[in-house]
Amino acid sequence: MTNFARLDLNLLVTLDVLLAEHNVTRAAQRLNLSQPAVSVHLAKLREFFGDPLLLPGPRGMLPTVRAEELREPLRQALEKLGHVITPSQVFDPAAARQTWRVLASDYGESTIVLPALAGLRAAAPHSRLAVLELRPASIARQAERGEIDLAFHTLDDAPPGLHARSLFTERYVLAARAGHPQLQKSLTLKRFCRLEHVVVSPNGGGFSGVTDQALSSVGLSRRVALSVPHFLFMVSALLSTDLVAMLPERLVRAHAALQVLEPPVRVPGYEMVMLWHERVHRDPAHRWLREHIAAAL
């Protein structure tokens, strides 16, 4: 108790951020403090714990064994303390001035963010929404650090440890420009494989996907002539060429300039989910945002 009585609790907040950032400058920016002030906090923390806690490294600061032992218990303790001292409030979207940050691919922007946007602007006119580029490998880290509120991703590739809510199930259809000369009669599997296809490769440069896996299972392959990083560019390519593509139905089902067909091969679909961290799970504003998006879909 004697040691705890002489500890400024603000120092623990600084330590929590330092253990997340491993960098004094970035920690100072997140805490809205000067870099010298954070350095002073770190010096006091080192004295209190009798340990250097963070050591200079080639790519930032490296936590000591003692710092690693403190990381998770400290984060949990600060979150619980936050719940204790913050009174429960009813969220009023009409008066709120929130800034929400969500991760979405261009597919998620079109099928999730866009359907929810008009209602969000009407219900919370003073709030702001930032849509950030989805990088699947970074979802868990960004959520843990509080850098994002939500991420929209497929269930199969969702990182463990986050809350998930199903939004919809998607399926694949064959799409091409209206009047495509090779799609004017019944499409056989053999003719499907001879068409020139375009695929989305989020990581860049890939020429195969779930359709190719389905074809391979029956001893067939298709011609993939173009690989692009985004769905929306793929649609533009379809409109200006005789390329075809296997696309999520929600992207193309209302596109007047495209014709949409049932493919002659069964390709498994996927489930889209909304992901968020435990730290915001009970926050009234965050709960309102999640319910609004789910209702919009």
Image: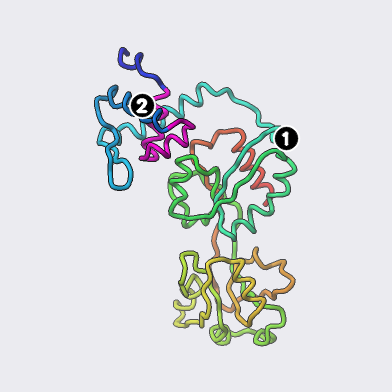
Task: Read off the residue under disc 2.
Answer: 40
For the image shown, how many numbered marks are present on the structure? 2
Which amino acid does the dot numbered 2 rest on?
A: Val
Q: Write down the quadrant of residue 195 in the picture.
A: bottom right
Indicate which label's residue lies in the foreground, 2 or 1: 2
Q: Position of residue 226 (x, y in %)?
A: 53, 77
Task: Read off the residue under disc 1.
Answer: 94
Residue at (64, 38) in percent of width and height: 288
Q: The N terminus lies in which quarter of the figure?
A: top left
Which amino acid does the dot numbered 1 rest on?
A: Ala
Residue at (63, 82) in percent of width and height: 242
**Left or right placement of residue 159 versus residue 3 in this view:** right
Residue at (45, 77) in percent of width and height: 217
State if disc 1 and disc 2 touch (CB < 8 Å).
no
Magenta residues (range) = 10-34
In the displayed structure, 98 sits above or below 247; it is above
**Left or right placement of residue 148 versus residue 251 in this view:** left
Q: Is residue 113 part of the magenta span, yes or no?
A: no
In the displayed structure, 152 sits above or below 277; it is below
Residue at (61, 40) in percent of width and height: 99
| Disc number for residue 83 | none
In the displayed structure, 4 sits above or below 183; it is above
